[in-house]
Image: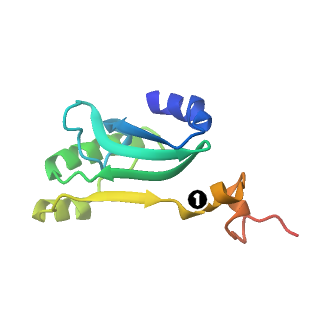
């Protein structure tokens, strides 16, 4: 609920480059728990001119914790949550063999181009033939 409120009320108002940090564990099932804040994870997103440009987090490497999160996500999916994921047994098997500390960073080049070109829609900067209007 908090994340939905943030997306609807705040994201569009973030004009200056802004790092939003420490997300709720419920919306970040692959991120490592925060070191000092229970219920949060080590994650940040970069917003500029109301648009998300980057998403990053420390990867969860504990297979027991990851299984519990996947099972919680699977229950949400079974209840009708379209954004929830299921249990990924292959991924859990890899974690059980051992995974060194890792992190992920996704920078949307397409979104960066949108910012630089002052384009209001991703359709304006990337050629999606099936999405472009017939000309």
Asked if residue 16 is positioned above or below residue 105 in the image, the reply reads above
In the image, is 114 to the left or to the right of 93? right
Counting the numbered discs, the total is 1
Above or below, 93 against 17 in this view is below
Front-lying residue, 1 or 82: 1
Using a 10 Å C-alpha cutoff, classify the residue at mark 1 as few (fewer than 14 neighbours), some (14 to 19) or many (20 or more).
Answer: some
Name the residue rendered at 14%, 48% in the picture. 64
Q: Tell me, what colour scheme is on the image?
A: rainbow
Query: Which residue does the image show at 25% across and 62% down from the upper left?
Result: 91
Instruction: Give SS at disc 1.
Output: helix
Query: Is 62 displayed left or right of 21 in the figure?
Result: left
Mark 1, residue position: 112
Residue at coordinates 12% horizontally, 63% vertically from top-left?
98
Outermost residue to the left: 97
Estimate the x, y position of residue 63 in percent, counting from the top left. 16, 52
**Residue 69, x across and y down, in percent:** 26, 43
**Residue 31 visible in the snapshot:** yes
In this picture, residue 96 sits left or right of residue 66: left
Say above or below: 112 vs 30.
Answer: below
Q: Is residue 86 visible?
A: no
Vertically, is 96 above or below 65?
Answer: below
The x, y position of residue 22, in whole percent, is: 34, 37
Viewer-proximal residue among 77 and 129: 129
Quarter of the picture containing the C terminus is bottom right
Tell me if 31 is positioned left or right of 94 in this view. right
Q: Residue furthest front?
A: 16
């Amino acid at each position: 609920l908090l994340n939905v409120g943030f997306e609807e009320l705040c994201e569009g108002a973030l004009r200056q480059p802004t790092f939003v940090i420490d997300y709720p564990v419920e919306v970040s099932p692959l991120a490592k728990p925060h070191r000092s804040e229970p219920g949060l994870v080590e994650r940040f997103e970069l917003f500029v001119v109301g648009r998300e440009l980057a998403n990053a987090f420390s990867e969860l490497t504990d297979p027991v914790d990851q299984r519990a999160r996947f099972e919680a996500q699977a229950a949400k999916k079974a209840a009708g949550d379209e954004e929830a994921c299921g249990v990924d047994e292959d991924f859990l098997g890899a974690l059980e063999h051992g995974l060194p500390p890792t992190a992920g960073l996704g920078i949307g080049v397409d979104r960066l181009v949108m910012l630089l070109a002052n384009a209001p829609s991703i359709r304006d900067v990337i050629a999606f033939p099936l999405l472009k209007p017939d000309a």
